[in-house]
Image (cartoon, rainbow, N blue to C red):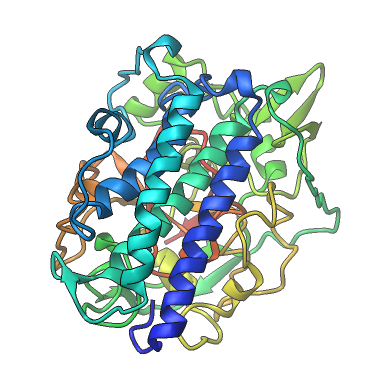
Amino acid sequence: MLATQNGVALRYDLSQRLFHARKQSDDLFAMVRGDSLYERPIPERHRIIFYLGHLEAFDWNLLHERVLGLRSLDPEFDRLFAFGIDPVGGGLPTDTASDWPSVNTVKDYVSRVRSSLDAPLAALTSELDGRTYDNFPLSTLLNVAIEHRLMHLETLSYMLHQLPLDRKIRQKERTHVGSSRLDHRMLEIPAGSVVLGLPRGGDEFGWDNEFDAHTIDVPAFSIDRHKVTNRQYAHFISAGGYETRSLWTDHDWNWRINHDISHPVFWKRSNDRWLYRTMFDEIPLPLDWPVYVSQAEAKAYANWAGRSLPTEAEWQRAATPATRNTNGAPEALRQFDDLNSRWNPGPVHASDVESRFGVRDLFGNGWEWTSTAFAPFPGFEPFPFYRGYSADFFDGQHFVMKGGSPRTAACMLRPTFRNWFQAHYQYVYAGFRCVGR
């Protein structure tokens, strides 16, 4: 959010973005059939009903006392819906559907939170008079609320992707399969420096892990022009990649064996062919789409190909834009204006937008795994109002992803945004490309 915007424009922008994000979350929950809101499509995550309450509980816990001086409406629900889960080490949630409140009760909580926040927030945003909260302006806290909701809309999308097809209300779903021949060559990236992160004190909004900006020297390397496709990954499977012990680390191999992992979670074997499960259908495997896999699977493929995954700095260096717009984001971002524009990826060569070095398909067609463990940048300071957002995951078991997926909101397709997940997490819309050194 640019601090130089006048008060009227800033107020309108924040209000419209919040209301639009709410509508998007409402529409996404409405896609789930009523008897399926207590399902748990992904074993490591909460049941869907949790997220129905979580989005409002987060906004309420962030703003009601700190900014508005309001008393809690429902302390029990404020705590129940406060935090998601990301179990490390194999532990899974054991709650039952009956442990959760009724859908109507949760919807009532959502309604009460919104009605309690909106009027006093409107009065504050009409002024934006320079007051700070925990030394941050109100615009920063509202951006946190908005982007937190938008992040969860992507999380919910890939969760609902795993929900049985008959438990969802079908929406329009475009699929662009593509058939033209792909140039899978690698591109040479010369040695040079790259700036990671945002400068502190600037006008742009960023999360705590995006600060501080710092420069890293990157030796020369080569990188895939395109993401690895389903077609390429199918060759890896046919070559016995999942059965070749030498391609996997001990930790990754044990995970593969213990969970009987033999193919990407978005693929399904039907007789003698592979199907791809979109949000609402099962279709013949789109060979030119990027393959979505866990980091462990991506590493095994890279080993098979005699390559590696890029570091965060290498990826950022390869993504150096050919031109830049006014806030420093690649011009490619302009083509993605709404996370509801697509449910599925497209062919990796569908867009002709490329970086300064000719690398394509970097933003909006799937996150890209790196080999970099998620860790703080020099000068990192946690948000005092959300201390655990990043710091809780500086554990060496989460890895940085860059770029963005078809379900990533446009505001988070910025070059400095850092996503992260555990190496064995298969469900996120994340692909990869290989590097040579």
Q: Residue placed farthest to the right in the image? A: 179
Residue at x 50% of width, y 24% of height: 103
Residue at x 40% of width, y 66% of height: 314
Q: Residue 421 appears in which quarter of the rendering?
A: top left
Q: Please tell me which residue lies in front, 198 or 177.
A: 198
On the rendered structure, is 150 left or right of 285?
A: left
Residue at x 33% of width, y 68% of height: 206
Q: Please tell me which residue lies in front, 345 or 12.
A: 12
> Can I make out residue 369 in this image?
no
Q: Is residue 201 above or below residue 272?
A: below
Residue 305 in percent (x, y) is at 55, 45
Q: Is residue 174 above or below residue 274?
A: below
Residue 431 in percent (x, y) is at 55, 48
Q: Is residue 6 above or below residue 429?
A: below
Residue 331 in percent (x, y) is at 58, 80
Q: Please tell me which residue lies in front, 235 or 377.
A: 377
Residue 236 in percent (x, y) is at 62, 35
On the rendered structure, is 53 left or right of 273?
A: left
